[in-house]
Amino acid sequence: MDKFIIEGNRNLRGSISVSGSKNAILPVMAACLLSPGKSILRNVPDLIDLKTMAHLLRIIGARVEHFAGTMTIDAKDICFSEAPYELVSKMRASIYVLGPLLARLGEARVSFPGGCAIGTRPVDLHLKAMGELGAEINLEHGYIHATAAKLKGSDIYFEKSSVGATINTMMAAVYAEGTTTLHNAAMEPEVDSTIDFLNKMGARISGKGSTTISITGVEHLFPVEMTMIPDRIEAGTFLIAGAMSRNPVTVRNCAPQHLQVLIEKLRQAGCEFDIGTDSISIQAPQTIKPVDITTLPYPGFPTDLQAQFIALMSLSDGTAFIEDTIFPDRFMHVAELNRLQANIQLDRNIAIVKGVPALSGAEVMATDLRASAALVLAGIAAEGRTTVSRIYHIDRGYDRIETKLNAIGARITRETS
Ligand code: EPZ
């Protein structure tokens, strides 16, 4: 398994570019199953999770090509098949094929997603919504088996905000009879970009940017071409890297409007900004002030930046309280950061981060995607050398992160074993 060797005490400086959004591309790849024909996606990075989804689409019969940032998906000849356990267990977003397969073929078999390092990751909201659209859902031998002759529009109330359930249900409803209205729908930018993609295909979806989304069923959808939105979590990760450095760092090819709450929290920590239409320059203060955060659905503070923010707060000149209300168990990175001599205690789903003057390099282990990003940021700032093992986690959601960070002054070597 690959590991990163990180030389610490590095002050980053310069411009770093953001790639297309993993969490926007995954649902759009699944949405391509809705229409016979070849769609073209641009600004698609090279990520393990996208390879996994491409493998799943090929099992279903689609032809997927990905070269130099452009992905083509031809779903002309898809046939009923199942999303197998070995793929779904690797990537929970495989559940996104459920809605499109139900809508287009009237049947889907998807392995029941297991848990992962950040929590149990239930799919009850997905299944309840599909049932309300008229699908028959059976759970058998670890698989979800859904069938529906014709889905019927319905009023659906989500008891909690769920990105995946909102998007999956939208995709299931595009061919349903009549109108489906989703209440308490998620408002993440990745929901909006999926709505844009589906409407470009010929769907009739309104309510973008609100918690009430209406889908009026249509007869046909057509393949389209679209450029994917930038990855706000990668952009946020790089902004936090800039906040941990003495020098100015500029994050390019990003969407500042998707990062407002992070920018506000970094301002409270003492950082200064110069914000353009698709770039953000950050200058950290001499000492970072402690800032409390509570993760919330968008536009609140994203849970996917919680680990990275804790790495920053571990070097503040006070105590910060970091609460995760989305994934209460998402704190595997705390023990590893404490190996770097951070001073963090856990009280249920709250991390109490007492800032220390410096971190000290050590051997640590990545446990999940965003935890590994936090360990890389901490290793760059720590005194001495840090080794991060199991970095396949980071390659799931960051395209060549070491190349991008080394170009602005980090010194990270990938050791393949
Ligand atoms: C998406 O996961 C993202 N993944 C996650 O990013 C992100 O952390 C999460 O949204 C929250 O923003 C992708 O987009 C591929 P949810 P998703 O459904 O859709 C509960 C990363 O690092 N819930 O919005 O699975 C759930 O347990 C990944 O890129 C149910 O109870 O998240 C959580 O507490 C990690 N029942 C809350 O809702 C359900 O049926 C929000 O989860 C579904 C979810």
Image: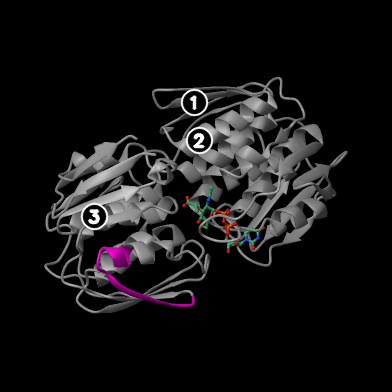
* Tags 2 and 1 touching, CB below 8 Å: yes
Q: Quick check: is the Cβ at mark 1 less than 8 Å away from ligand 1?
A: no
Please say whether residue 381 is visible from this viewpoint: yes
Q: Dividing the image into 4 quarters, which one contains the N terminus?
A: top left
Residue type highlighted by circle 1 = Met
- Residue indicated by mark 1: 71
Q: Does 362 lie within the magenta span?
A: no
**Could you tell me residue 266's position as x and y percent?**
27, 65
Q: Work out whether residue 154 or residue 9 is closer to the camera in this orientation and state it.
A: 9
Left or right relative to 130: residue 51: left
Disc number at residue 379?
Answer: 3
- Above-or-below relation of 345 to 8: below
Quarter where residue 15 is shown: top left
The amino acid type, in three-letter code, at marker 2 is Leu
- Tags 1 and 3 in contact by the CB under 8 Å rule? no
> For the residue labelled by badge 2, is the local secondary structure a helix, a strand or a loop?
helix
Q: Position of 66 compared to 10: left or right?
A: right
In the image, is 410 to the left or to the right of 182?
left
Residue 355 lies, with reference to residue 367, above or below; the image says below
Image: magenta residue range? 337-348
Residue nearest the observer in this picture, 360 or 225:
360
